[in-house]
Image: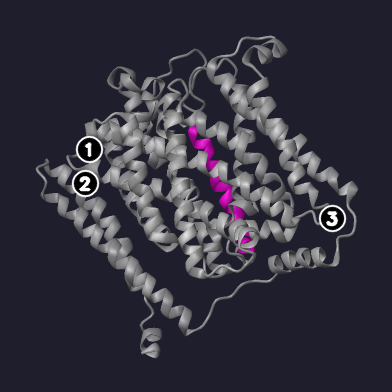
Amino acid sequence: MLAGKAYNDGFAVAVIFVANAFGYLMNYLYFAPKFRQLRVVTVIEAIRMRFGSANEQVFTWSSMPNSVVSAGVWLNALAIIASGIFGFDMITTIWITGLVVLVMSVTGGSWAVIASDFMQMVIIMAVTVTCAVVAIIQGGGVSEIIANFPITTEGGSFLWGNNLNYVSVFGIWAVFIFFKQFSITNNMLNSYRYLATKDSKNAKKVALLACVLMTMGPLIWFLPSWYVAGQGVDLFSIYPEVGKKATDFAYLYFVETYMPAGMVGLLIAAMFAATMSSMDSGLNRNSGIFVKNFYEPVIRKFNATEAELVFVSKITSTVFGIAIILVALFIQSLKGLSLFDTMMYVGALIGFPMTIPAFLGFFIKKTPDWAGWGTLVVGGLVSYSVGFVLTQGMLQDFLGTELTSREWKDLKVAIGLIAHITLTGGFFILSMLFYKPLTEKRQADVDKFFDNLATPLVSEGATQQNLDNKQRKMLGTLIAVSGVAIMGMFLLPNPMWGRSIFLLCGGIVMAVGLLLVKAVDEKVEATEA
């Protein structure tokens, strides 16, 4: 979905990843170990400790739709690529790919999804690095690719893109995207990515890795799209059946046209894995929240067996999977809205307001419990006003000038973020004025929440090391074998440079796998034996 934005507007899309890198840097410096130290199974348990049982139910039911919509956006992006490769219609592709990802997620469980996340990162990294190398060679270097990027409107630039009369609009959008990405990466609701790490120290390592990858990523990921744009390729004429979403095919076009035979298969395999990773928030994560924060405490009053909880979680995962497919189908019907714009609207108007109490609650202790759900109500009103009441004509009349379609979309996102920072965030802060001492039980929960945050989690001992060794050996071997299989694609009928691409790609994957296997501590294994 971001490849289309890079094709249209050059470096502008990289702002999101620079902002992500900053957010993960803050994770590394402060938030990541705190998230792990929450010592919870689901993030909503942390909400319950901080804001009470009423907010547990409010956040349980309000967080799930956001995850489902976000996962639907990713599924639609996968279907776009798969449809272009296999030639199926989009509706059939969404159903097939959605059901495949659903089966993989439900049958594999949380560990399988986490392992798949790591594998897809390695494979996507290898594929995108090799594609970037080919783009640089084909384009005559990075500087040449940038120089050839088409400037189609007056005042346009590779840095901020086209279709802008006022560069200040891009500046406003970029500034508040930083606020948004910082908030999204540093709040309780999105702390789940660190709950699976074994201790505080490893949570910091995960955050640092994400920061490094987000810093290097834009140049690697978007060079092919910039190159395609510089070649004057008209994606709308090549993919007329998808309307304005045609630019989302930029990366697929590059792989099909400039990469050796067989690379498209690797791309779609990596995208399946990446989509399963993204759908996990709408499947396993949502299922876990439903079971642990509603079914077990409310329906079963903590009397359910583990087997029952597992069975219910699989049923709910299936329900959420169908819901994600339906959302993806709805998004597909909106041919006039690009996936990038969809992602921006979902993040700014649905995701961002939910992060405000989950972020500020880390630092502001003396707020009434109703500040949690009250902030969501205010956020909902603000989002409705920006999303459905505010129109382009109203904004143009207020500013006294005409706006291009891109300026309107960017300003709509920025206005939504500004409104939430001032109004939604302001409501939470002002709730301090109504703070009254909590009951003894509630105060004990709040004290436990902040005590957990302040207490480092250390995982040591031969048993833990042995478990680490088993996971390193299992995952490392699997990745190394995958690398060898990719290198085996050297035998496909391609020119020598094309064969070398598979050696490079497979070599990167195999090297990561071998490093994992080499990290096995044989002394611990010998002790356990």
Disc 1 to disc 3, C-alpha distance = 58 Å
Side of 125 relative to 418 (left or right): left
Q: Give neighbour class at mark 1: few <14, some 14-19, many 20+ (Cα, 10 Å).
A: some
Marks 2 and 1: in contact by CB < 8 Å?
A: yes
Residue 499 disc label: none
Per the image, the residue denoted by label 2 is 501
Q: Nearer the viewer, residue 423 or 86?
A: 86
Per the image, the residue denoted by label 1 is 259
Q: Is residue 30 shown above or below 434?
A: below
In the image, residue 231 lies in the stretch drawn in magenta: no
Q: Report the mark closest to the observer, 2 or 3.
A: 3
Q: Give neighbour class at mark 3: few <14, some 14-19, many 20+ (Cα, 10 Å).
A: some
Secondary structure type for disc 1: loop
Q: Nearer the viewer, residue 112 or 239?
A: 112
Q: Is residue 25 shown above or below 388?
A: below
Q: Is residue 345 shown above or below 192?
A: above
Per the image, the residue denoted by label 3 is 366
Q: Report the mark closest to the observer, 1 or 3.
A: 3
Where is residue 514 drawn, in percent x and y?
A: 30, 67
Q: Which residues are magenta?
A: 12-35
Where is residue 252 drawn, in percent x and y?
A: 30, 33
Which residue does the image show at 12% across and 41% down from the upper left? 494
User: Would you say the magenta stretch is mainly helix, strand or loop?
Assistant: helix
